[in-house]
């Protein structure tokens, strides 16, 4: 198999642009055209006061003494005029709200922030082709969540921990709604939240803690299992790939070999050989099959004993040696191997492992009630004793409470989504939460307001080897505003995306792994412009994208056709019908998984049951 073709998706750095929609609920099959998600026809509302008047808005009741508007002025983005309001909520929560001057159609959209935040994001992911967004019809807002810059040292301040955990996002929604009422003389008709990665955690946290804040919540690749995700998963991945000499054991150059072997065994399980694993839960691959024969002098087509050991530990995850208890829900899924590059598999043995930075920032400053004086990954204990210490702050940071009765009573709708090939956050976390919601709320009730979509070949929030461009915002609006529960969603991968080198060549993908964050600004400064949809989404600043060489670029087939694929609500999956062009969504039908998801027994299983939040 051609390794260049296997790595073609590494070129998808411009992901999340145009998306179209497929399918609808049977209940509405007779009253709307196939493949559409109609939204409410709302009138345009214009301001009743000048933008500069908003500078005098009193925020004390929302954020406390010291909360203030720092600027309110008209700006223009993509031809749309906005009243852009910047401000600070005490003690240091920066926020930006953009209010359309002449195009507002009574909808509010708040956007999440990735990584440990520290910057303001006003780019909406998973919303490509969303017409109201493109036309600048939303009031939009976002927050830096109480600190500036990407260091985790804000965790030395208990107040800033709370601001990051939940307060910054919630209070920003209150500010935005107050500004809306003041500027337009009326409240918004509908309020939505859209976020991925930590933005996904923020999204689900809102539905759980503050069920009346939003009518529709879109949570992508949510870092909801925050404690185990950073202090266990990423710590483990870095630990097992670090040799006695302090250097990485497995490097990115070895990943195509591994990925090819996984595809050879599991690609056709869905009935089609297309370079994608649509049902990783049905894949059972043994890395030992790649072990080099004893005495082999050439390892170009096999893995050494130490490399096999690393790969096995990646898939298996950490386990308490005394009890045999798993310490995470799950690790990277089969088919995600190329996406490991730059995360826990560096490009050379001399490069630092990015997961080390993620784990270190969390463990030193955030994960424990009392911050350790130092952090030494080589001597970090992956056992129940360490895990039990993480339980104390689970009710603060984690957003895994499946009791969404308040959100359901409010009439809220929730869309969860995740890429099957996500290297940063295992999709098993999101599946586990989806299953927990069904268990607590009841399947019928849960189905009335919650959906989960899993995208084959998609990486973390964007990009990947499979179709990964999608618009979930329009289906969400249709669900909230018209009662049209979404069914199949169309994902797309264009030829241009496969052959774009945007964001590649630099091992950090243009992002800075250390020091000042790329795109980060001072409190109140906009890092991104409003009214846009694109690949930025909530991808944590500092998360590297894999590089691509000019030689590999030259090998890629420029005539490769675009691909579209329907994605059905979990657990259903798309299966090739056996007829038609396999690159077209119309050639697929709804199928059932070969292996149903089974509840996972792990140390934090109780995290996914109802609990009281910690303030």
Image: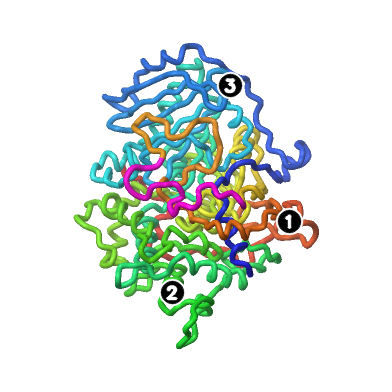
Question: The C terminus is located in which quarter?
Answer: top left
Across and down, in percent, residue 208 comes to: 44, 43
Q: Residues within 10 Å of mark 3 (few under 14, many from 20)?
A: many
The answer to whether 138 is drawn above or below residue 571 in the figure is above
Residue that carries the numbered disc 2 in the rendered image: 307
Residues at discs 1 and 2 in contact (Cβ within 8 Å): no
Direction right: furthest residue = 579
Q: Give the label, 1 or 2, closer to the camera.
A: 2
Q: Secondary structure at mark 2?
A: helix
Direction top: furthest residue = 49
Residue 439 shows up from this direction: no
Across and down, in percent, residue 188 comes to: 52, 24
Q: Is residue 3 magenta?
A: no
Q: CA distance from mark 3 to mark 1?
A: 39 Å
Q: Earlier in the sequence, mark 3 or mark 1?
A: 3
Question: The N terminus is located in which quarter?
Answer: bottom right
Residue that carries the numbered disc 1 in the rendered image: 588
Query: Which residues make up the magenta segment?
Result: 499-518
Q: Earlier in the sequence, mark 3 or mark 2?
A: 3
Q: Nearer the viewer, residue 12 or 416?
A: 12
Q: Earlier in the sequence, mark 1 or mark 2?
A: 2
Q: Secondary structure at mark 1?
A: strand
């Amino acid at each position: 198999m051609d390794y260049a073709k296997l790595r073609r998706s590494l070129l998808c750095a411009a992901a999340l642009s145009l998306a179209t929609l497929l399918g609808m609920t049977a209940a509405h099959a007779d009253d709307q055209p196939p493949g559409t998600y109609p939204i409410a026809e709302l009138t345009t509302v214009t301001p009743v006061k000048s933008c500069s008047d908003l500078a005098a808005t009193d925020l004390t009741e929302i954020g406390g003494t010291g909360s203030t508007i720092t600027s309110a002025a008209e700006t223009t983005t993509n031809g749309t005029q906005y009243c852009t309001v910047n401000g600070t909520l005490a003690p240091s929560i920066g926020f930006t709200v953009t209010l359309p001057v002449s195009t507002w159609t009574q909808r509010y959209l708040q956007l999440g922030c990735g990584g440990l935040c520290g910057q303001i994001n006003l780019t909406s992911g998973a919303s490509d082709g969303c017409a109201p967004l493109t036309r600048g019809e939303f009031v939009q807002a976002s927050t830096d969540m109480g600190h500036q810059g990407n260091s985790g040292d804000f965790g030395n301040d208990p107040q800033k921990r709370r601001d990051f955990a939940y307060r910054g996002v919630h209070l920003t929604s209150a500010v935005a709604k107050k500004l809306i009422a003041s500027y337009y003389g009326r409240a918004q008709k509908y309020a939505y939240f859209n976020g991925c990665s930590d933005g996904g955690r923020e999204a689900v946290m809102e539905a759980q803690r503050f069920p009346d804040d939003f009518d529709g919540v879109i949570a992508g690749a949510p870092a909801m299992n925050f404690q185990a995700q950073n202090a266990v998963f990423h710590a483990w991945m870095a630990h097992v790939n670090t040799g006695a000499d302090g250097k990485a054991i497995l490097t990115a150059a070895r990943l195509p070999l591994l990925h090819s072997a996984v595809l050879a065994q599991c690609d056709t399980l869905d009935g089609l050989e297309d370079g994608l694993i649509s049902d990783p839960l049905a894949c059972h691959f043994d890395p030992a099959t790649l072990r080099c024969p004893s005495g082999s002098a050439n390892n170009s087509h096999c893995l050494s004993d130490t490399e096999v050991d690393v790969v096995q530990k990646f898939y298996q995850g950490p386990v308490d040696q005394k009890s045999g208890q798993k310490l995470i829900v799950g690790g990277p899924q089969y088919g995600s191997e190329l996406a490991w590059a730059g995360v826990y598999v560096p490009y050379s043995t001399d490069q630092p492992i990015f997961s080390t930075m993620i784990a270190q920032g969390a463990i030193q400053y955030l994960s424990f009630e009392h911050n350790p004086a130092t952090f030494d990954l080589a001597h970090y204990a992956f056992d129940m004793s360490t895990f039990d210490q993480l339980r104390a702050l689970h009710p603060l940071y984690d957003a895994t409470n499946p009791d969404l009765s308040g959100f359901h009573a409010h009439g809220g709708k929730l869309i969860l989504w995740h890429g099957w090939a996500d290297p940063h956050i295992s999709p098993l976390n999101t599946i586990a939460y989806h299953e927990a919601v069904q268990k607590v709320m009841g399947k019928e009730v849960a189905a009335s307001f919650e959906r989960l979509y899993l995208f084959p070949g998609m990486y973390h929030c964007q990009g990947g080897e499979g179709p990964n461009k999608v618009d979930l915002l329009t289906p969400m609006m249709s669900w909230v505003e018209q009662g049209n529960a979404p069914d199949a969603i169309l994902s797309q991968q264009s030829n241009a995306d496969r052959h774009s080198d945007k964001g590649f060549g630099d091992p950090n993908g243009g992002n800075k792994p250390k020091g000042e964050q790329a795109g980060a600004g001072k409190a109140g400064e906009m890092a991104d412009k409003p009214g846009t949809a694109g690949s930025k989404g909530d991808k944590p600043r500092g998360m590297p994208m894999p590089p691509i060489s000019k030689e590999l670029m030259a090998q890629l087939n420029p005539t490769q056709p675009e691909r579209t694929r329907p994605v059905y609500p979990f657990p259903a999956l798309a299966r090739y019908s056996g007829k038609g062009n396999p690159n077209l969504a119309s050639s697929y039908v709804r199928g059932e998984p070969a292996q149903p998801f089974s509840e996972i027994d792990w140390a934090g299983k109780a995290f996914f049951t109802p609990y009281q939040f910690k303030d």
